[in-house]
Image (cartoon, coloured by chain):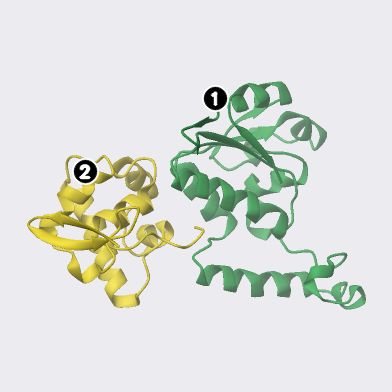
Chain colours: A green, B yellow
Amino acid sequence: MSATNGKLKKVSIIISKGSLEGVYPGLIMANGARMEGIEVNVFFTFFGLETVMKKRMDKIKVATVGNPAMHIPSLVGILPGMSSFATSQMMKEMDKLDIPPVSEFVEMIHDAGANMYACKATVDMFHLTMDDFCEQVEEVINVGKFYELAAGGQIIFT
Amino acid sequence: MATKTYAGKTIEVNEEGFLVNHEDWTEEMAPMLAEQVGIYELTDEHWKVIRFMRSDFIERGQIPTVRRLKNTGGIPTKDLYRLFPNGPAKKAAMIAGLGKPQGCV
């Protein structure tokens, strides 16, 4: 059972998007779950895999085009540097709340006891190897293995 | 508001057992508060966390996050989870006589 006495025991979180707003909610949910003593698996798939790629993890940006909630007209959003500028502004605000940069956050969540996995289909599609990932990634697994690991818990897709 | 008696002193606590006023806290209460969260022995390592939490709270008016405990308090996240299993920030705050942490990280 995933819940005993109304308390969640395990969550498996899928991070599938590679933008700042795609990555952070899943990481915050994972970290928050460990802080509540909930067992956590994090499965990175598609562009979400950039969260755990050594060369990409600290270059993740917020989308300034096609993102109405940013309230930046698309024509302005395409200007060179706009995405970097918006990202650095957001990161500053996040830092004030003690929300760390991606690499530090991944390390913290792993140190907190969460298990981290990369999706096999994506790894094959982008011709990646374990060397592309930070050390916190335990294994490249397929969907079947993901469901085995997630058994008895809740699954959150982001 | 409920009251509890720890180390001979009756104090106000909220419905989850957190102290209402951090000034009510004394070091003698810590082992009894720890028992409430399933920790039956407070080692020097536990005390390092408790003392940092209190001094940081008194200085800044905010309960330190796990990240602040790591970066400013010098307490590695792995150690924090080992010392206060299944809910380190909440348990450490409870033992240190502080309120329930309200942040998301």
Which residue matches tag 2?
Answer: B35
Label 2 to label 1, Cα distance in Å?
Answer: 28 Å
Chain letter behind tag 2:
B
- Residue beneath the point at 74% across and 44% down: A16
Q: Nearer the viewer, residue B46 or B7?
A: B7
Q: Is residue A137 visible?
A: yes
Question: Given the image, on which type of amino acid does mark 2 rest?
Answer: Glu
In the rendered image, the residue lying farthest to the right is A75
For the residues tagged 2 and 1, is the chain the same?
A: no
- Rendering coords of residue A76 (x, y %): 88, 78
SS class of the residue under badge 1? loop
- Residue beneath the point at 58% across and 49% down: A29
Which residue matches tag 1?
Answer: A1
In this rendering, is residue B1 above or below A12? below
- The residue carrying pointer 1 sits among few (fewer than 14), some (14 to 19) or many (20 or more) residues within 10 Å by Cα, namely few
Question: Given the image, on which type of amino acid does mark 1 rest?
Answer: Met
- The residue carrying pointer 2 sits among few (fewer than 14), some (14 to 19) or many (20 or more) residues within 10 Å by Cα, namely few
Q: Quadrant of the N terminus of chain B?
A: bottom left
Chain letter behind tag 1:
A
- Rendering coords of residue A141 (x, y %): 67, 26
- Residue beneath the point at 86% across and 67% down: A65
- Residue beneath the point at 32% across and 50% down: B91
- Rendering coords of residue B99 (x, y %): 34, 62
In the rendered image, the residue lying farthest to the front is B1
In this rendering, is residue A116 above or below A89? above
Q: Nearer the viewer, residue A49 or B90?
A: B90
Q: In screen coordinates, is A81 left or right of B2?
A: right
Q: Nearer the viewer, residue B40 or A82?
A: B40
SS class of the residue under badge 2? helix
In this rendering, is residue B76 above or below A62? above
